[in-house]
Structure formats: structure tokens, C-alpha cells
Amino acid sequence: METLSSRTAYDLWADAYPAFAHNPLMHAEQAIVEPLLLRLRARRALDVGTGTGRYLPILASTGAAVVGVDRSWAMLTRSKAALKRPPHTIISGAGLTGGGAGLNDCGAGLSGPRCICGDAVHLPFRRGAFDVINASLMVGDVADLHAWAREMARVLALGGHLVYSDFHPSWTEHGWRRTFRSADGATHDIAFEAHAIDQHLSALGGAGLRVEAIREPRLNAGDDPSIRAFRKRWGNPPIVVIFHAIKEP
Ligand SMILES: C[S@@+](CC[C@H](N)C(=O)[O-])C[C@H]1O[C@@H](n2cnc3c(N)ncnc32)[C@H](O)[C@@H]1O
């Protein structure tokens, strides 16, 4: 099977990518991330690599002004489905990276989230624009974790919170591949950037982000025979890692 670059893969995947947790890994991740985001009660929230917008309604439910950013136009177009309340505006990030003129309020005053097509490592927002950033399952597409963490820290206000998840280093240890099925039923393999826990810690520390908590959930077998089979074969390793970091005042 040909391994697709993440850019190609998400454009192809978008039509079949639901805006809710749609596999056991996402369920395990969301069981930790969602309550944390609800507790943080952002005023200005950014969802980086928002995809089809799984976390947009969750962030918006706290009353925050919410912005989602993603570099895949196809995924953003599908994010409309995640949002119950209009207006939901999708804006091209092209030409905005020089300071984000017109976007510096980050949606404050709007009654629904905004989505912007742009790159996580060059965000079109001013310094300190958000008090909470979420970034779920997207740093596995980012080669330069240090540059990414610096950009998160730049747009985060002092005392602001960064919550993000990544594929656990278990994936590399066990040689697991990331695959998905596109709308036409074909299965594809996606390239991903493996990051060790030490690399996360070094990137966060280098960006002035203090680690508040790290979680490493495993799959919950319950009655699901496929998860029981997985656990039997692999010994139930952690499958995702979640970081909560705070920008030091
Ligand atoms: C696995 S999906 C996760 C989507 C969503 N956060 C979720 O958990 O349902 C990863 C998303 O990150 C986006 N992405 C990857 N690299 C990016 C970058 N450098 N800048 C912006 N978005 C990026 C992809 O286009 C894709 O939509």
C-alpha cells in the first residue's frame, strides 16, 4: 500500500471523516480531553488542526469565542456539520500570516465558531490572543515539534492552557501504521511523525510551557471483542498521550 503524505491524506479522507470520536483511540482521548476543556472554561479558545471540528462545539459550549484552524480546506468544509449554531464562517488563511489583520479578535463577539485555513506553525493571530488552545491528534503530522510548541506559546496568553494529544510512542515500538478508509471504500496508509515523550517535554520546556499533567490512556475492553483481541495480542499498551501545559507568567 502506498503511504500518503498527511496533506494528501486528509483531503482524501475528509468526506469520510466524522466530526465526532469515531474509533476506540478517539473515545479514550476524548474521555480525558473533553472534561478538561470544560473545566478550563476558556474565554478565547483555539482548536489547532480542528479537522472536521470535533472539539468546536465542546469549546463553544463553555461560552468561549472559538476559532478552529486547519490547513486542509476539505476537512474544514466538513466541519460545518459539527456545528449546531450559525453563523459558522470559513476563511482562507492565505495572506493572513503577516499579522492576521482583521482576525485579531479571534471571533469574539460572533455567535458561532470561525474556521480558518492556515498552518499551525505560522498562525495568523497576534501574540497572546487565546487563553485555551486544544490540538487533538495533529502533532503527528508536524515534523518540527519545537517550532510548533513555540507558535502555540506565542498565541497563548500568560497563564493560558495548551491541551493536546498525540499518537503514543507505543505506535513506533510496535510498528503500527496509521490507515483510513476513504469514501470510495479504499484503504490508505498515512505517513506520521513519531514523537517520543522526551521530545514533547523538550519542545514544551523550550517554548516556556510548564507541563501540568500527562495522561497515557489505554483501550477499555468493555464488551468489544476487537479491543479484547487487540489487548490479547499487544498486552494493552497506552495508545495515545495527552499533555496539559501552562504558559508560565
Ligand atoms: C487526525 S486529524 C484530527 C482532527 C481533529 N483535531 C480531531 O481530533 O478530530 C489531524 C488534522 O490536523 C490537520 N493538520 C495537520 N498538520 C497541520 C498543520 N501544520 N497546520 C494546520 N492543520 C494541520 C490535518 O489537516 C487534519 O485535519
Image (cartoon, rainbow, N blue to C red):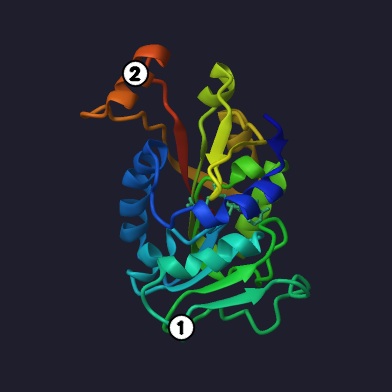
Classify mark 1 as within 8 Å of ligand 1 or not, answering yes or no: no
Please, is residue 19 above or below residue 191 in the view?
A: below
The answer to whether residue 23 shows anywhere in this view is yes
**Between marks 1 and 2 in the image, the one whose residue lies nearer the viewer:** 2
Q: How far apart are marks 1 and 2 (CA)?
A: 44 Å
Please, is residue 133 above or below residue 84 in the view?
A: above
- Asked where in the image residue 144 lies, by quadrant, the reply is top right
Q: In this view, does 183 lie to the left or right of 30?
A: right
Residue ID for mark 1: 87
Residue drawn at x 30%, y 21% is 228
Residue drawn at x 42%, y 65% is 82
Q: In this view, does 170 lie to the left or right of 24?
A: right
- Asked where in the image residue 233 lies, by quadrant, the reply is top left
Q: Percent from the top left, x then y, of residue 56?
A: 43, 65
Residue drawn at x 67%, y 50% is 148
Q: Percent from the top left, x then y, of residue 137?
A: 52, 45
Residue that sits furthest to the front in the current view: 184
Residue ID for mark 2: 229
The answer to whether residue 45 shows anywhere in this view is no
Label 1: how many residues lie within 10 Å, few (<14), some (14-19) or many (20+)?
Answer: few
**Which three-letter amino acid code belongs to the residue tagged 1?**
Pro
Please, is residue 19 above or below residue 168 in the view?
A: below
Q: Percent from the top left, x then y, of residue 173?
A: 56, 18
Nearer the observer, 234 or 133: 234
**Which three-letter amino acid code belongs to the residue tagged 2?**
Ala
Going from N to C along the chain, the mark reached first, 1 or 2, is 1
